[in-house]
Image (cartoon, grey):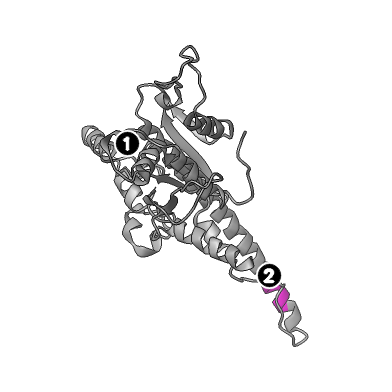
């Protein structure tokens, strides 16, 4: 089912599913044994999905195709049931049916899909925000013109009033900062992808002038994209970094949460200093005050 749309195009969160499942399994293990770390836990994926969905973010989880293969366990007496539904697979099937799962084709690099989806969303959002800015500027010009005409008419009677159009700061200005943005949630630095892009650029020995491609993967992951100015060389300046890096790092820790059966579950802790996370936590605190 398609995810709900609204007048505010929420940021797209692309989750590195394999990375999250492995990190969650490692954090949940009390022994940290080698055998345990080889068994990823998709519960971590569901926890991350729920975190961002609570704040109406669009969410996509990318996983390798092999993760959807169901096999009977060693102790399953009915070995003929090759499509046995395990709790892990059930979670993934639920994500798939709700439109949150993207499966990378067999033998393809899932990291490539993760980065491509997030950057495509960022590029589309950049173009849409520029178009919206142009429309807004036209409306402001019209409003200012009408306001000036209204003031001239009222000055004849010794009264100066405006046409009622305010320049008040919108309470949801932060929403505009993250409108249509694309982010990757991963503890991976994507060094292989960065090196691959740098090698490709060296071979081509030329830059791309298109607005959607003129920032490197490394800069996008570490700094994000500035659309306040068409010159993306200004990306390092503080005023161009309000939407945050393209990558959101994270951790898991136990904060006392339990599931419906009383079993301990870990809490998702995204980078507290990432601007998007700061925005989400401000909303969370406002909601808490109302209860």
* Disc on res. 36: 1
In this view, the residue farthest toward the top is 80
Residue 27 percent location from the top left of the image:
35, 46
Reading the image, the residue beneath label 2 is 165
Quick one: 104 or 78, which is closer to the camera? 78
Q: Is residue 70 visible?
A: yes
Q: Position of residue 216 (x, y in %)?
A: 31, 44
**Is 150 inside the magenta-drawn segment?**
yes
Of badges 1 and 2, nearer the viewer stands: 1
Asked if residue 258 is among those painted magenta in the image, a careful observer would answer: no
Instruction: Give the residues in magenta.
Output: 147-152
96 to 28, vertically: above or below: above
Q: Main secondary structure of the magenta part?
A: helix
Q: Residue 10 or 162: which is nearer the viewer? A: 10
Q: Which of the two discs, 1 and 2, labels the residue nearer the N terminus?
A: 1
Q: Secondary structure at mark 1?
A: helix
Q: Is residue 157 left or right of residue 229?
A: right
| Residue furthest to the right | 157
Query: Which residue corresponds to the image point at 33% horizontal and 39% vertical from the top-left?
Result: 208
* Position of residue 42 in the picture relative to residue 193 (left or right): right
Residue 216 visible at all:
no
Residue ID at (46%, 40%): 43
Label 1 to label 2: alpha-carbon separation? 62 Å
Quadrant of the snapshot with the C terminus: bottom right
Mark 2 packing: few (<14 Cα in 10 Å), some, or many (20+)?
A: few
Which residue is most to the bottom? 158
């Amino acid at each position: 089912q398609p995810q709900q749309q609204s007048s505010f195009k929420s940021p797209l969160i692309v989750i590195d599913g394999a990375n999250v499942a492995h990190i969650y399994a490692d954090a949940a293990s009390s022994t940290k044994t080698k055998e345990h770390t080889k068994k990823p836990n998709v519960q971590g994926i569901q926890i991350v999905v729920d975190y961002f969905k609570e704040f109406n973010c669009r969410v996509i989880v990318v996983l390798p195709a092999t993760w959807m293969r169901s096999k009977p366990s060693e102790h399953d007496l009915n070995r003929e049931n090759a499509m046995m539904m395990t709790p892990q697979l059930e979670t993934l099937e639920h994500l798939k049916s709700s439109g949150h799962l993207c499966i990378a084709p067999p033998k393809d690099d899932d990291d490539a899909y993760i980065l491509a989806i997030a950057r495509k969303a960022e590029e589309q959002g950049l173009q849409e925000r520029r178009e919206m800015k142009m429309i807004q500027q036209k409306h402001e010009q019209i409003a200012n013109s009408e306001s000036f005409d209204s003031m001239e008419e009222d000055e004849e009677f010794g009264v100066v009033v405006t046409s009622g159009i305010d320049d008040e700061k919108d309470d949801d200005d932060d929403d505009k900062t993250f409108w249509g943005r694309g982010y990757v949630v991963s503890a991976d630095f994507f060094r292989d992808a960065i090196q691959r892009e740098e090698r490709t650029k060296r071979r081509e020995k030329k830059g791309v002038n298109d607005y959607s491609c003129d920032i490197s993967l490394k800069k996008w992951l570490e700094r994000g994209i500035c659309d306040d100015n068409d010159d993306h060389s200004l990306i390092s300046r503080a005023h161009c970094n309000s939407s945050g890096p393209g990558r959101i790092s994270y951790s898991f820790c136990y904060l006392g949460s339990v599931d419906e059966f009383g079993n301990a579950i870990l809490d998702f802790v995204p980078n507290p200093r990432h601007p998007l996370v700061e925005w989400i936590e401000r909303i969370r605190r406002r909601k808490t005050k109302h209860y």
